[in-house]
Image (cartoon, coloured by chain):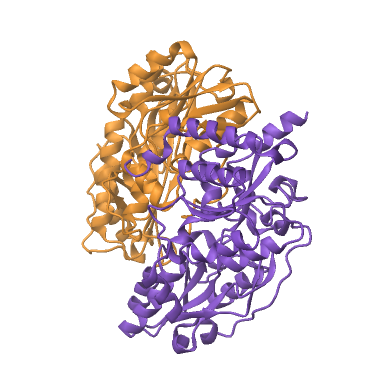
Chain colours: A purple, B orange
């Protein structure tokens, strides 16, 4: 397959792995502990498991699966809000597929659908707008979810709804921003990270400048990475190269997609429709300042939060759930007390087990190869 | 619409309205007309006398083998007609294949149809004709059946349940727990076509593809395979849950580990592209004409050549091997040089957000 196979070349991978091994051996700290590199984005977690990259990397490199799965960091209270909107008889509630199974405190959207709510899976917010156009007697709500990657598409859909005079369409905005979240992780006292694989698709929208503080203030290298396996390996190599040379910079491996300055029409649409919230609640990480956005007053008629009375209750994460520690890279998924016992993909307690991009679900489903190696080595 | 052998002629009823109503399920003349016109007309060679059950001559059955195989399956699919098949073809192939993978020669099917009021009679006729054509090609007879009509909304257009009877020849013993270390794992062709075709046919992905369902009755292919590789340990059809699910069942039942090779796994280029775009894994996509076979290594070549000579086995490939390792574990060598675990799917595969 063109544009995919070139980035999955086995021989190039072997060469890269050799180079990574050589570089890692030159880095002093690997003599006492592995280097911890966090991939911020769930898409990277998915590639890492799908291609078995963990097992290919030397033991001196640990990949830490970060918070960049928007489905995973969604707090239970927000799922409850979705269910409460979806249960209005006049509402058609539309969502991306992988949000369907996220547990709320009462039920997931999948259960709400089984109980009679009109919940529909769509592939784009424009599909939701088409539903609104075709169902003028119903209110179509789109569950706006995701980082900067999906923000422009919901913003443009709101602008399209305005242009077309469609009044029965609204967005339940739960978009979140990546930068304050990385900052929160970097400020965490129990942090053990040596570098970051930067989120490729988010960066396609925001560019690379917003990450400069990571290098300038926190002295950690970041490489904005693509999602094919060679992209990930090359980015790991670039991080190691920086560490070995004593540099901490923001570099861009994914130049075929990510312009340094980002995508200005997309950013303009986002700025037109949305503004920052003072704070937003994250599952496992708690409340983070300026980490969420909401619909601006000018577009209030497309804002589900203003159209519906939303319970907006804070539901504490289950006590036994250690998603927070896993998200921050303090614990490996299988080190969580409930991993694989009380918390499985069938009955997820924590959101990291829900989405296939969640670190725990990925370990449970695809992973375990590295973990097996660790266990074998220990025994 | 139960059919039996003919002593005298009867007049078949005719339907004169365009769509099914609740009257067609009420047990009266309208129902008889529907059954006669749509189903008996399509299925029965000699529709003269109807009894409440089909009757079989035991001595005749025994000439085919020494054990009966008996299976049932229900079919619901949206849309009813899709590239490469329809619900009728699916309902016949599905049950024929469930018999054939046990080594049985499929002989008789029943057909129970639940119809939502409002379904066009022409749609029913097309489905019945497709069932008849598929059954005839597979050498099975549809010998008994039932229809029910339910109110609008109580079912989605047409649900079909088929039950099948087959006979297993004396020397055939296919069973998942017979898989041994070193056995090789084969498939009869490219994977995931049915699942991808159905998702595309629903139209809400706005993806234009030329992917056709692989829906096919595999009794002929399996007979050919068993003749060429009599040591075959077991065969499973990789329907819902795809080959990943079947491989996990095989690994678990045989208390072995199975490792497959991604590079050897046959996939159409457009199914691969389809999965890339939606973030789906083709190993979990449904098939309706694909089987996973475990054979001892010395029979692998014979099994592959026999299948490749058959139209439903042209793309047959050796994809993996059973061996020691963590019991019940399925792993895959990725084309990239890594290794990953292939687990059972929990629910549906949901497309990824970004």
Residue drawn at the location 75% of the way across and 51% of the way down: A338
Q: Position of residue A114 (x, y in %)?
A: 54, 64
Residue B292: tell me if it is visible.
yes
Residue B2: tell me if it is visible.
no
Q: Quadrant of the C terminus of chain A?
A: top right
Q: Quadrant of the N terminus of chain A?
A: top left
Compared to A232, does B58 lie above or below?
above
Which quadrant of the figure has residue A365? Answer: top right
Q: Position of residue B132 (x, y in %)?
A: 27, 40
The residue positioned farthest toward the top in the image shown = B298
Of residue A57 and residue B61, the one placed in the foreground of this image is A57
Q: Position of residue A221 (x, y in %)?
A: 59, 53
Residue drawn at the location 66% of the way across and 54% of the way down: A347
Compared to B306, does B107 lie above or below?
below
Q: Report the side of B43 relative to A249 (left or right).
A: left
Of residue B10 and residue B61, the one placed in the foreground of this image is B61
Q: How many marks?
A: 0
Q: Report the side of B190 relative to A51 (left or right).
A: left
Residue drawn at the location 29% of the way across and 45% of the way down: B211
Compared to A87, does B204 lie above or below?
above
Q: Position of residue B29 (x, y in %)?
A: 30, 59
């Amino acid at each position: 397959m063109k544009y995919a196979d070139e980035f999955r070349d086995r021989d190039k991978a072997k060469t890269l792995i050799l180079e990574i091994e050589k570089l890692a051996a030159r880095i002093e700290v690997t003599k006492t502990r592995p280097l911890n590199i966090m991939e911020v984005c769930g898409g990277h977690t998915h590639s890492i498991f799908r291609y078995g990259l963990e097992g290919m990397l030397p033991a001196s490199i640990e990949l830490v699966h970060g918070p960049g799965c928007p489905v995973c960091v969604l707090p239970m209270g927000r799922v409850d809000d979705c269910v409460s909107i979806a249960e209005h008889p006049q509402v058609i509630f539309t969502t991306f597929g992988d949000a369907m199974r996220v547990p709320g405190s009462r039920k997931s959207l999948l259960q709400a659908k089984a109980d009679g709510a009109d919940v529909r899976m769509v592939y784009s917010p424009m599909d939701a707008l088409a539903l609104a156009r075709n169902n003028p007697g119903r209110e179509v709500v789109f569950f706006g979810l995701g980082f900067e990657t999906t923000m422009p598409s919901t913003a443009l859909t709101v602008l399209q709804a305005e242009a077309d005079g469609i009044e029965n369409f609204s967005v339940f905005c739960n978009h979140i921003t990546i930068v304050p979240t990385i900052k929160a992780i970097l400020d965490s006292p129990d942090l053990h990270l040596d570098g970051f694989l930067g989120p490729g698709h988010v960066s396609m929208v925001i560019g690379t400048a917003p990450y400069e503080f990571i290098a300038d203030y926190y002295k950690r290298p970041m490489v904005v990475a693509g999602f094919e396996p060679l992209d990930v390996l090359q980015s790991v190599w670039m991080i190691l190269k920086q560490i070995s040379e004593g540099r901490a910079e923001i570099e861009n491996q994914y130049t075929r997609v990510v312009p340094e300055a980002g995508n200005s029409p997309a950013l303009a649409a986002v700025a037109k429709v949305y503004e920052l919230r003072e704070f937003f609640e994250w599952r496992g990480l708690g409340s983070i300042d300026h980490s969420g956005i909401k619909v601006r007053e000018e577009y209030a008629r497309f804002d589900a939060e203003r159209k519906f009375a939303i319970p907006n209750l804070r539901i504490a994460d289950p006590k036994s759930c250690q998603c927070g520690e896993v998200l921050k890279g303090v614990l490996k998924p299988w080190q969580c007390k409930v991993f694989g016992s009380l918390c499985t993909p069938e009955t997820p307690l924590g959101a990291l087990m829900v989405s296939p991009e969640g670190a725990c679900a990925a370990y449970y489903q695809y992973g375990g190869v590295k973990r097996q190696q660790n266990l074998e080595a220990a025994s | 619409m139960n059919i039996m052998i003919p002593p005298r002629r009867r007049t078949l009823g005719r339907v004169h309205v365009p769509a099914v109503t609740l009257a067609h399920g009420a047990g009266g003349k309208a129902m008889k007309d529907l059954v006669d016109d749509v189903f008996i007309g399509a299925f029965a060679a000699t529709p003269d006398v109807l009894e409440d059950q089909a009757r079989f001559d035991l001595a005749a059955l025994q000439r085919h083998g020494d054990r009966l195989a008996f299976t049932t399956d229900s079919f619901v699919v949206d849309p009813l007609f899709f590239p490469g098949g329809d619900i009728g073809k699916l309902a016949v192939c599905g049950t024929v294949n469930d018999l054939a993978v046990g080594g049985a020669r499929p002989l008789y099917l029943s057909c129970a149809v639940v119809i939502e009021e409002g379904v066009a009679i022409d749609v029913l006729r097309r489905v019945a004709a497709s069932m008849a054509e598929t059954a005839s090609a597979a050498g099975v007879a549809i010998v008994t059946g039932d229809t029910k009509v339910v109110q609008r909304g109580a079912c989605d257009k047409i649900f079909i349940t088929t039950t099948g009877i087959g006979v297993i020849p004396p020397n055939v013993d296919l069973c998942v727990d017979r898989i041994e270390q070193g056995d090789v794992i084969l498939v009869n062709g490219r994977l995931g076509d049915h699942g991808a075709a159905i998702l595309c046919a629903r139209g809400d992905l706005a993806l234009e593809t030329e992917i056709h369902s692989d829906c096919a009755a595999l009794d002929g292919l399996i007979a050919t395979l068993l003749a060429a590789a009599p040591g075959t340990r077991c065969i499973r059809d990789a329907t819902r849950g795809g080959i990943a699910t079947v491989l996990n069942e095989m690994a678990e039942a045989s208390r072995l580990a199975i490792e497959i090779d991604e590079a050897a796994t046959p996939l159409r280029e457009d199914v691969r592209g389809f999965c890339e775009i939606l973030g789906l894994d083709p190993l979990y996509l449904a098939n309706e004409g694909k089987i996973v076979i475990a054979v001892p290594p010395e029979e692998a070549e014979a099994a592959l050549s026999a299948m490749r000579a058959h139209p439903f086995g042209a793309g047959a490939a050796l994809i993996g091997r059973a061996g020691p390792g963590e019991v019940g574990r399925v792993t895959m060598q990725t084309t990239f040089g890594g290794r990953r675990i292939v687990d059972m799917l929990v629910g549906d595969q949901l497309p990824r957000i970004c």
